[in-house]
C-alpha cells in the first residue's frame, strides 16, 4: 500500500532529475528507498539532501575499502532497513531493572528462606536498555566482540557506517557460499533470516516498480502504447 501511494512522490523529486542517478547511484537509491516511506518534504525536513549525499559518499568509500563493491546496493538497502539512514537510530526496550542488595545478619533474622542470610533481594525499577546503535544498528555484543566504540558509533557517521561494512565483509568471507549469507547481519535463526531477507528485498522491489511506473508515464506522455 505504501509503495502504491508514494511512488508519485518519487517521480516528482527534482533531486532525481535526469543525470542525477547516473552520477550518484547510491544517493539516488537512498532517495528512492526513503520515497517509499516519506514524502519529499518529509525527507527534506528530516534529513536534508546534504546529509544524504554525505551518507552516499561514505557508503561508496567504505564498500570499496571492505571489498563490498558488488554488495554496494545491498548494503545501502540494509542500512535503510536497519535505521532509515538515521545516524541517531537506537533500538531500545523498556522493562524493570533488578538492583540487588546484600542483607546483614540482623536483617536476615527470622527469614529462613534466605540462603545463609546473604541472599540478594531484588528491588524493581523502570529502566530503558538499548541494544543496537547508529545508522548500521550495531548490536552491543557485536561492538564488544569487534572492539567498536558505541559512543563513537553514535557521534561519528563514517565510523558507524564503516563498522557495519566491516561486519558485512566478515560475513561475506565466512558464509559467501551460503544462500542469503548477508541476512546473518541481522539474525542467526533460519526463520528470522527469511523474514529479514523479505524486509530488505522490498526496497529493491519498490524501486523496480517506481522505474516501471516512470517508464510507463513517459511512454504515455509521448504517445507510445504501454
Image (tube, grey):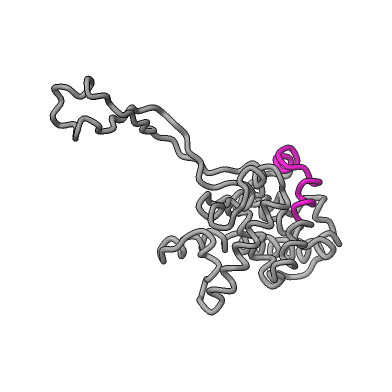
In reply to whether residue 29 is colored magenta, the answer given is no
- Residue 93 in the image, given as x and y percentages of width and height: 46, 39
- Residue at x 69% of width, y 44% of height: 39
- Residue at x 72% of width, y 59% of height: 29
Q: Quadrant of residue 182?
A: bottom right
Question: Which one is in front, 15 or 66?
Answer: 66
Q: Residue furthest bottom?
A: 177
Number of labelled discs? 0
- Residue at x 50% of width, y 45% of height: 131
Chief secondary structure of the magenta portion = helix
- Residue at x 41% of width, y 66% of height: 190
- Residue 200 in the image, given as x and y percentages of width and height: 56, 60
In the rendered structure, which segment of residues is drawn in magenta?
Answer: 41-56
Question: Which one is in front, 16 or 55?
Answer: 55
Quarter holding the C terminus is: bottom right
Question: Which one is in front, 93 or 162?
Answer: 162
In reply to whether residue 52 is colored magenta, the answer given is yes
- Residue 170 in the image, given as x and y percentages of width and height: 59, 68
Q: Is residue 140 left or right of residue 224?
A: left
- Residue 59 in the image, given as x and y percentages of width and height: 73, 59
Q: Quadrant of residue 57?
A: bottom right
Q: Quadrant of residue 33?
A: bottom right
Q: Is residue 168 left or right of residue 54?
A: left
Q: Residue furthest top?
A: 106
Amino acid at each position: 500500500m505504501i509503495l502504491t501511494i508514494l511512488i508519485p512522490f518519487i517521480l516528482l523529486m527534482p533531486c532525481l532529475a535526469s543525470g542525477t542517478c547516473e552520477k550518484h547511484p547510491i544517493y539516488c537509491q537512498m532517495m528512492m528507498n526513503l520515497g517509499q516511506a516519506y514524502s519529499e518534504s518529509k525527507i527534506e525536513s528530516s534529513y536534508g539532501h546534504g546529509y544524504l549525499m554525505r551518507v552516499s559518499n561514505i557508503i561508496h568509500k567504505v564498500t570499496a575499502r571492505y571489498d563490498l563493491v558488488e554488495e554496494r546496493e545491498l548494503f545501502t538497502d540494509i542500512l535503510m532497513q536497519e535505521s532509515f539512514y538515521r545516524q541517531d537510530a537506537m533500538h531500545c526496550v523498556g522493562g524493570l531493572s533488578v538492583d540487588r542488595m546484600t542483607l546483614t545478619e540482623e536483617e536476615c533474622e527470622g527469614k529462613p528462606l534466605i540462603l545463609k542470610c546473604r541472599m540478594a533481594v531484588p528491588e524493581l525499577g523502570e529502566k530503558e536498555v538499548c541494544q543496537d546503535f547508529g545508522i548500521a544498528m550495531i548490536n552491543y555484543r557485536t561492538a564488544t566482540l569487534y572492539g567498536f566504540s558505541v559512543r563513537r558509533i553514535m557521534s561519528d557517521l563514517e565510523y558507524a557506517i564503516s563498522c557495519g561494512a566491516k561486519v558485512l565483509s566478515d560475513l561475506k568471507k565466512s558464509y559467501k557460499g551460503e544462500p542469503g549469507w548477508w541476512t546473518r547481519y541481522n539474525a542467526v535463526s533460519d526463520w528470522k533470516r527469511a523474514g529479514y531477507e523479505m524486509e530488505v528485498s522490498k526496497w529493491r522491489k519498490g524501486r523496480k516498480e517506481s522505474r516501471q511506473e516512470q517508464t510507463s508515464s513517459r511512454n504515455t506522455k509521448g504517445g507510445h502504447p504501454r
